[in-house]
């Protein structure tokens, strides 16, 4: 998820997306531990998406 997409979402939507992204990341990480993924770069992309969403939520809480 791109930063521009993250900024357009509401706080409730961001929290929902954060839960989904964290679950997808943990599932993908577990699958990678069992057998290597074809594209391990997916892990990095999901991890960064989680960070983007969490950062935006924190930024909005501080405002």
Image (tube, rainbow, N blue to C red):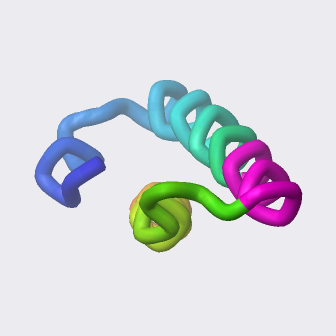
Residue 59, picture quadrant: bottom left
In the rendered image, is residue 60 in sight?
Answer: no
Is residue 7 left or right of 22 when viewed as pictured?
Answer: left
Relative to the observer, which residue lies in front, 21 or 62? 21
In the rendered image, the residue lying farthest to the left is 4
For the C terminus, the image quarter is bottom left
> Magenta part of the protein: which range?
26-35
The answer to whether residue 18 is above or below residue 39 is above
Count of numbered labels shown in the rendering: 0
The answer to whether residue 13 is above or below residue 57 is above
Q: Position of residue 31 (x, y in %)?
A: 77, 49
Is residue 43 covered in magenta? no
Q: What residue appears at the point 49 percent right and 56 percent down from the top-left corner?
A: 38
Chief SS of the magenta region: helix
Relative to the observer, which residue lies in front, 8 or 21? 21
Q: Position of residue 42 (x, y in %)?
A: 45, 59
Q: What residue appears at the point 54 percent right and 65 percent down from the top-left corner?
A: 43
């Amino acid at each position: 998820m791109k930063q521009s997409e993250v900024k357009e979402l509401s706080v409730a939507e961001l929290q929902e997306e954060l839960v989904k992204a964290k679950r997808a990341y943990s599932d993908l990480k577990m699958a990678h531990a069992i057998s290597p993924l074809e594209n391990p770069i997916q892990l990095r992309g999901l991890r960064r998406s989680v960070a983007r969403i969490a950062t935006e939520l924190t930024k909005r809480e501080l405002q």
